[in-house]
């Protein structure tokens, strides 16, 4: 086991094609983040003022929801490596719950904004806030769909200790959704 | 395998603690507007460094990049640093 | 050719090439009108020639896509076409409708054509690329639906591959987005929205799926590379094309009266549209490098690689050049747009259709795999002549465009449109010269089908 683990591979675990896709997605987010930062620089007053209207507490809970969900995906992979399909299925289920928790809290935030009549045209700050978080929101939805497929596959016993590439690839996508939020959270909610 | 679970737990706990720290820095009503107490640039740099560390942890452990050598090992970390770098330009200058 | 019914594609391909020649002739007429204003006036006014040029382009590309589908779907599904009869019937319906429409453009004034065809009942005419009379549009929908039915049933009864799935998705999208051409709101902003929902979502959305699947088919056949590898690439290309292309529509909403956030959404997402095109380039070269066989049909491989490169240049590079709002502010609707439009259409869609024609035609005409060496040499000449001519057309138009932007919009004392047009006349002459070379290349392409000789044999590679 130890010998096996110490041998490093050249390519990341999972499907390389998926990793290329992840890179493309990360590029999109990077450009969005940079656009936010540069636009902010010429509208500092406006951005600082409206940033305080955001709900940082919900954002904290959301971050923890995503982290926990990611944690369970990793646990599911460790379980599958021990051929514990049942346990792995359970972990995946929990990670899906985490994803939904994120969606629900985010929707609560959106409905609050909507009740105040805030939309993309309100001002530049909200334009960025809504665009960035909604684009990420769509990724969470896609990620949850991936997780559901992984969960069903695991339940059917499609993955084993020697053959769980699909699980690793799908998991990597979910972690990508997570790590993007880890930048988004401080950038939009806290940095000033 | 015990070791894998333990590593996972440690990484997860670190991530949550760092997140809490980030959140605390944003609690302007409790601790006041930090950006007025310390230099705004330092405030920004602390937040950015934490974010990059967190992303690095996700890449290295959750995405198993620590089992990879060469270019791909650093793909996520590199992304975080480049993105962070771009964000930093308007914040710092 | 493995299945008898694949041969219906031949009709479609022949019609496609015939109309292609017509398109280029009208391009040359317009090119001359740019420098000799009353050339052929009043017989063929510029606006009519333009309509014929662009509509022929769209129609022959559609013929090409349909032919490609009729050829590759039976082979992929490993079954005969659902109904070859229907495919032949629809060919004639489409050809006659197309011919009548073009004749209508040429023979009567556009306003009269609109009146004759009852445009007032359901006004859809008058928008660029979608000038067809309403009845022609209805005809197109009927042909498209029948075609989809035929293809879908063939796929359903046979083997389902990723290639046919994506092709079908692209073709269905093509038909669905065309429906927006029936909605013609009075509000000018909305009018533009719906127009772009057809034009942009076609070329930067669903047509990319069609292109990717045809390209994958030709590459599988000519390189012998494993299907699994190609399929994975297809998925990512398609996902990227849709993510960037759908929201990227926003790059047309900058100045039409749409909300301001489109400046951001449009710029950011369309700036990423080159990615799927770039992936197609990498994909094509990767496959050819990993090839297991040296296919004797060299021109087909050349067209496939050519389309991957030229699509990236025309759509990716020339598209990116003017897609960011601060740049587009100056370049909007100038010759830069025309430069991009030409190279993108040629690189992505003209070349992919020529690639599948080049691959399939020899077999449909009774050869085992390919044409004679002599014929292949002629065809490769035609490839280089057309492609280099298009590069020069693009460069001359880009030159014209940069000067135009400078003199008309950027300098301290901007000049009026017509004054500027006079100043950049030289570029238009050079464009016309390159256009003549393009036509020669195209005629050589046609000629290559008539060069006889012994067929080249298949050489396997170890
Ligand atoms: C094969 C794919 C493509 C084709 C066939 C194509 C074709 C065209 C055509 C014909 C036009 C002119 C439309 C009109 O009449 O106003 C146009 C406009 C435009 N295209 Fe593309 N295009 C493609 C891909 C792209 C890509 C990938 C980008 C961006 C990266 C792009 C950016 C633009 C922009 C910004 C305009 C508007 C120009 C203006 O403001 O006048 N295109 N395209
Ligand atoms: C396969 C080759 C060609 C393709 C795919 C093609 C495609 C197009 C497209 C998409 C447009 C509309 C552009 C826009 O709205 O900006 C257009 C317009 C035009 N094309 Fe072509 N074309 C081809 C060849 C030629 C050639 C060889 C010539 C002449 C030398 C030519 C001359 C023109 C002219 C003069 C216009 C009108 C531009 C304007 O409205 O100002 N084209 N063509
Ligand atoms: Fe577009």
Image (tube, grey):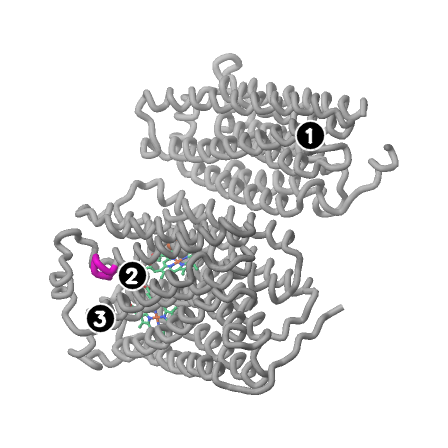
- Between C217 and C21, which is closer to the camera in this rendering? C217
Q: Which residue shows up at 44% across the image and 77% down it?
A: C389
Q: Is mark 2 within 8 Å of ligand 1?
A: yes
Label 2 secondary element? loop
Label 1 secondary element? loop
Q: Is residue A47 above or below residue C68?
A: above
- Between C23 and B11, which is closer to the camera in this rendering? C23
Asked whether the viewer can see residue C326, the reply is no
Q: Which residue shows up at 53% across the image and 22% down it?
A: A62
Is residue C404 toward the left or the right of residue A19 in the image? left
- Which quadrant does the N terminus of chain C fall into? bottom right
Q: Which residue shows up at 36% across the image and 47% down it?
A: C250
The residues bearing labels 3 and 2 have C-alpha atoms spaced at a distance of 12 Å
The circle on residue C48 is: 3
Q: Is mark 3 within 8 Å of ligand 2?
A: no
Residue, disc 1: A157
Residue, disc 2: C129
- Between A165 and C414, which is closer to the camera in this rendering? A165
The region drawn magenta spans C131-136
The circle on residue C372 is: none
Q: Is residue C344 above or below residue B41?
A: below
Number of the front mark, 3 or 1: 1
Q: Which residue shows up at 32% across the image and 34% down it?
A: A121
Host chain of mark 1: A
Q: Is residue A143 above or below residue C432?
A: above
Label 3 secondary element? helix
Q: Position of residue C431 (x, y in %)?
A: 37, 77
């Amino acid at each position: 086991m130890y010998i096996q683990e110490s041998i490093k591979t050249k390519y990341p675990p999972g499907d390389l094609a998926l990793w290329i896709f992840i890179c493309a997605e990360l590029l999109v987010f990077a450009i969005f983040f940079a656009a936010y930062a540069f636009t902010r620089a010429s509208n500092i007053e406006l951005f600082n003022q409206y940033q305080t209207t955001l709900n940082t507490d919900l954002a904290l809970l959301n971050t923890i929801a995503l982290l926990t969900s990611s944690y369970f995906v990793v646990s599911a992979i460790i379980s599958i490596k021990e051929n514990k399909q049942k346990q792995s299925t359970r972990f995946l289920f929990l990670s899906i719950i985490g994803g939904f928790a994120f969606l629900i809290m985010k929707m609560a935030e959106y409905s609050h904004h909507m009740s105040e009549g805030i939309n993309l045209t309100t001002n530049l700050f909200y334009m960025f806030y809504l665009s960035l978080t909604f684009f990420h929101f769509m990724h969470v939805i896609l990620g949850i769909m991936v997780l559901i497929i992984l969960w069903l596959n695991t339940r059917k016993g499609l993955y084993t200790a020697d053959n769980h590439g699909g699980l690793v690839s799908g998991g990597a996508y979910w972690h990508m959704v997570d790590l993007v939020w880890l930048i988004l959270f401080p950038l939009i909610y806290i940095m000033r | 395998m015990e070791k894998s679970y333990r590593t996972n737990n440690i990484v997860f706990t670190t991530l949550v603690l760092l997140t809490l720290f980030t959140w605390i820095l944003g609690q302007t009503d409790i601790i006041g507007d930090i950006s007025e107490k310390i230099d705004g640039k330092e405030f920004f740099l602390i937040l950015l460094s934490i974010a990059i560390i967190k992303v690095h942890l996700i890449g290295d452990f959750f995405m198993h990049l620590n089992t990879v050598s060469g270019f791909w090992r650093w793909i996520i970390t590199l992304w975080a640093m480049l993105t962070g770098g771009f964000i930093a330009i308007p914040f710092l200058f | 050719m493995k299945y008898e019914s694949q041969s219906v594609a031949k009709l479609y391909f022949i019609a496609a090439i015939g109309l292609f020649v017509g398109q280029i002739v009208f391009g040359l007429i317009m090119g001359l009108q740019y420098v000799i204003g009353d050339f052929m006036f009043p017989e063929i006014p510029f606006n009519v020639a333009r309509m014929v040029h662009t509509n022929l382009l769209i129609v022959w590309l559609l013929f090409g896509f349909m032919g490609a589908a009729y050829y590759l779907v039976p082979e992929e599904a490993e079954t005969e076409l659902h109904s070859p009869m229907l495919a032949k019937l629809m060919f004639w319906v489409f050809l006659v409708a197309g011919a009548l429409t073009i004749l209508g453009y040429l023979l009567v004034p556009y306003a009269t054509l609109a009146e004759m065809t009852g445009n007032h009942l359901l006004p859809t005419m008058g928008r660029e690329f979608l000038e067809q009379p309403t009845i022609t549009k209805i005809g197109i929908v009927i042909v498209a639906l029948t075609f989809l039915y035929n293809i879908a049933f063939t796929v359903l009864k046979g083997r389902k591959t990723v290639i046919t799935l994506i092709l079908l998705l692209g073709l269905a999208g093509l038909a669905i987005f065309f429906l927006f051409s029936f909605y013609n709101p009075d509000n000018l902003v909305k009018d533009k929205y719906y127009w772009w929902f057809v034009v942009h979502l076609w070329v930067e959305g669903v047509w990319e799926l069609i292109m990717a699947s045809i390209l994958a088919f030709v590459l599988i056949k000519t390189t012998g590379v494993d299907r699994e590898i190609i399929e994975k690439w297809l998925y990512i290309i398609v996902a990227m094309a849709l993510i960037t292309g759908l929201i990227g529509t926003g790059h047309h909403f900058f100045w039409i009266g749409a909300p301001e956030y489109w400046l951001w959404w449009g710029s950011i997402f369309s700036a990423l549209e080159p990615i799927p095109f770039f992936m197609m380039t990498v994909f094509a070269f990767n496959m050819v490098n990993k090839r297991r066989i040296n296919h004797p049909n060299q021109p087909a491989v050349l067209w496939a690689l050519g389309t991957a490169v030229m699509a990236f240049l025309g759509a990716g590079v020339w598209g990116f050049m003017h897609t960011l709002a601060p740049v587009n502010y100056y370049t909007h609707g100038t010759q830069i747009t025309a430069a991009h439009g030409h190279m993108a259409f040629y690189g992505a869609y003209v070349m992919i259709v020529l690639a599948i024609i080049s691959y399939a035609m020899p077999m449909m005409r009774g050869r085992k795999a390919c044409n004679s060496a002599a014929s292949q040499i002629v065809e490769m000449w035609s490839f280089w002549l057309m492609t280099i001519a298009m590069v020069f057309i693009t460069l001359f138009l880009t030159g014209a465009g940069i000067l135009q932007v400078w003199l008309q919009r950027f300098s301290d004392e901007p000049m009026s449109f017509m004054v500027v047009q006079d100043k950049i006349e030289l570029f238009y002459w050079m464009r016309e010269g390159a256009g003549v070379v393009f036509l020669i290349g195209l005629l050589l392409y046609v000629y290559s089908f008539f060069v006889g000789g012994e067929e080249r044999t298949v050489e396997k590679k170890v």
